Amino acid sequence: MLIVLLPEPLLAAGLESPPLYWWRLGREGGLLESGQDDLPALRRRYPAERLRLLAPATATSLYRVSIPVRRASAARAALPFALEDQLGQELEELHLVAGPRRADGRYVAAVTEHRCMQEWMQLVEAAGWRADAMLPQGSLHQDQTPERGLRIQPSPWPNGQSTVLVTSVDQEPVLIEQELLGFWLKQRLGQLDEDQRRVQLIGLTPEQLGIDADCEVDTAVPASLEAALLASLQPARSLNLLTGGYSSGMAAPPWRKLRPALVAAGVLLAVLIAQQGIQTVTLNKERDRLQAQIDQLFDETLPRSRRVDPVTQFRQVLEGASGQAAADGMGVLLHDALAAVAAEGSAKILQFRATPAELELELSLPSFAELEKLRSQLAASAGLSESLQGADSDGEGVTARLRIQRNPS
């Protein structure tokens, strides 16, 4: 994870890509590397690292406000009205973010200018990066809250050599210039109750700060930069400035949430492709085996034929044999039937229709007696059977239709 401290808008004015302080943290939060480079250089150096931004305290203010609601959505809607009296700018110029609820029941609110947000976004987008979150720099020192009063200690940040960190129970952490501390401290102490007007100094003395307030010098270890960086890794921090219109351009791409489903779909697709490949190989082997068997059968069945297309050649041979058998069967049936008609002498064939299985004759005979005589002759013929389909008589004789079939052997 790369943690990058964004520049102050006034300091970055006129610079296409100003140098920024950065820290690279491991999975457990340990500091691996740090330095000062511009974002394009960091992008080339760490293209696969996730990016988390810190908005400088000089451009981001933190407040605690009382909002008589419990739902987070209602708190976000009521935030502009709760902050209206504390802000010296038009609300349209400011980007307001509602944070978590503190132990005293009040909500944390972060305020910065839209102008600053737009400049920071352009800076990051120009480098081709997407940020996971943008956190106020001061919000990372919430763990430095004293039990009562104010705690003042040196700023651990590399851009804050003349800056001090002020924390208290009733307000959010503040990073303030030492030159402004005396005036600010008088006003701040006036807002506290008598029992809370206590100033604790860590790593500093009243003479260094130029203040004459009643102070207690503590020998505790000042706030460390490593602790603040570790706090920036919290996965569920709700005080994220990338909300509203700034969430789509800077947040993680939408497909990242679908990554498990996409991986599962990719695995399934790979399995299907592998299965299809195995089936194709199996079918090709089966085809080659059947082709070899067909060739072997052709060579054994038609040894004198030249093998070109065995399947087509087999089909032609079978059709030729079937046609020859059909022609032979029809010829025998015609011969036997016509021989019986010719033996009658007086019968004349008007028309006939023949198939390999049967023969239909339309005959003209002098009388019904000759018709019955012909039927008797056909019935007496070996292997033939006849049936009368119809008969008509007129002044010239009898017209009859006979169906002649070969008896099954």
Image (spheres, grey):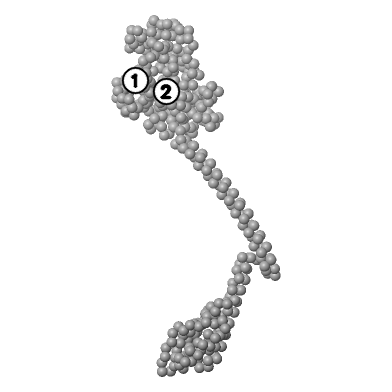
Count of picture labels: 2
Q: Measured from the top left, where is residue 377 in percent x and y?
A: 53, 88
Residue nearest the viewer, comparing 287 with 46: 287
Mark in front: 1 vs 2? 1
Kind of residue at badge 2 = Pro
Task: Work out whether mark 1 precedes mark 2 in sequence or the reverse, and give the earlier one.
Answer: 1
- The residue positioned 43% from the left and 26% from the top of the image is 236
Rendered image quadrant of residue 163:
top left
The answer to whether residue 179 is seen in the rendering is no
Instruction: Please give the label number shown on residue 106.
Output: 1
Q: Is residue 16 left or right of residue 189?
A: right
Residue nearest the viewer, comparing 74 with 253: 74
Give the SS element for disc 2.
strand
Kind of residue at badge 1 = Arg
The answer to whether residue 389 is seen in the rendering is yes
Query: Pointers 1 and 2 in contact (CB under 8 A)?
Result: no
- The residue positioned 50% from the left and 93% from the top of the image is 346
- The residue positioned 36% from the left and 22% from the top of the image is 101
Q: Is residue 393 left or right of residue 316?
A: left
Q: Measured from the top left, where is residue 327 in percent x and y?
A: 58, 79
Q: Is residue 43 above or below residue 406?
A: above
Check disc 1: other Cα within 10 Å, few if <14, some if 14-19, many if 20+: some
Instruction: Please give the label number shown on residue 283.
Output: none
Give the residue at mark 2.
Answer: 136
Say which quadrant the C terminus sits in.
bottom right
Check disc 2: other Cα within 10 Å, few if <14, some if 14-19, many if 20+: many
Looking at this view, name the residue that lies furthest to the right.
Answer: 304
Q: Is residue 244 left or right of residue 308?
A: left
- The residue positioned 49% from the left and 40% from the top of the image is 262
Q: Measured from the top left, where is residue 235 in percent x and y?
A: 46, 26
Q: Is residue 389 above or below residue 291?
A: below
Q: CA distance from mark 1 to mark 2?
A: 18 Å
